[in-house]
Image: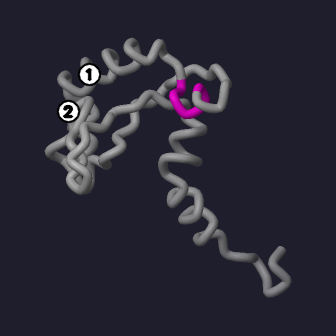
Amino acid sequence: MNNNSFYCSRAWRKLRREVLKEDHNECQICKKNHKHVKATVVHHEYHLDEYPQYGLMKHVQNPITGKLERNLISVCNNCHETVCHPERIHKEREYKIPLTEERW
């Protein structure tokens, strides 16, 4: 199953609603910083590309420590891009080619 079909599946949509409800629709990263921002994304701590077996699991056992950890976390879009996936921001910057040698 590719990521697109996973995120469109009934099971994922149901689980996503549950996680958002459990987190009171608040971004958990902003909440740690004493801010209250509405969560719009449920993020996989164990990324779906690397750990597809954890895709529908709220909690997973850490393969190194053996401790039970949260896998799904409610976040705002800003935190999802800047905190959870900073590599996406760097990739966008790499592809911007200057128009001239003077870089403008």
Residue identified by numbered label 2: 56
Q: Nearer the viewer, residue 27 or 64?
A: 64
Kindly state the secondary structure of the residue where label 1 is placed.
helix
Residue 103: percent from left, percent from top: 81, 78
For the residue pair 28 and 97, the one nearer the viewer reads as 28
Question: Dividing the image into 4 quarters, which one contains the C terminus?
Answer: bottom right
Magenta stretch containing residue 28, yes or no? yes
How far from the left and from the top, in percent, is residue 51? 21, 51
* Residue span colored magenta: 27-31
The three-letter amino acid code for the residue at tag 1 is: Leu
On residue 15, the disc is 1
Residue at left offset 36%, top offset 43%:
45
Give the image quarter of residue 55: top left
Report whether 49 appears left or right of 95.
left
Q: Position of residue 30 (x, y in %)?
A: 61, 30
Q: Mostly what secondary structure, the magenta segment? A: helix
Q: Which residue is at a point 51% across and 28% down the rendered structure image?
A: 28
Query: Which of the labelled discs sits on residue 24, or is there none?
Result: none
Q: Identify which residue is drawn at 58% across, 57% down.
A: 89
Residue type at the position of mark 2: Leu
Q: Are marks 2 and 1 in contact (CB under 8 Å)?
A: yes
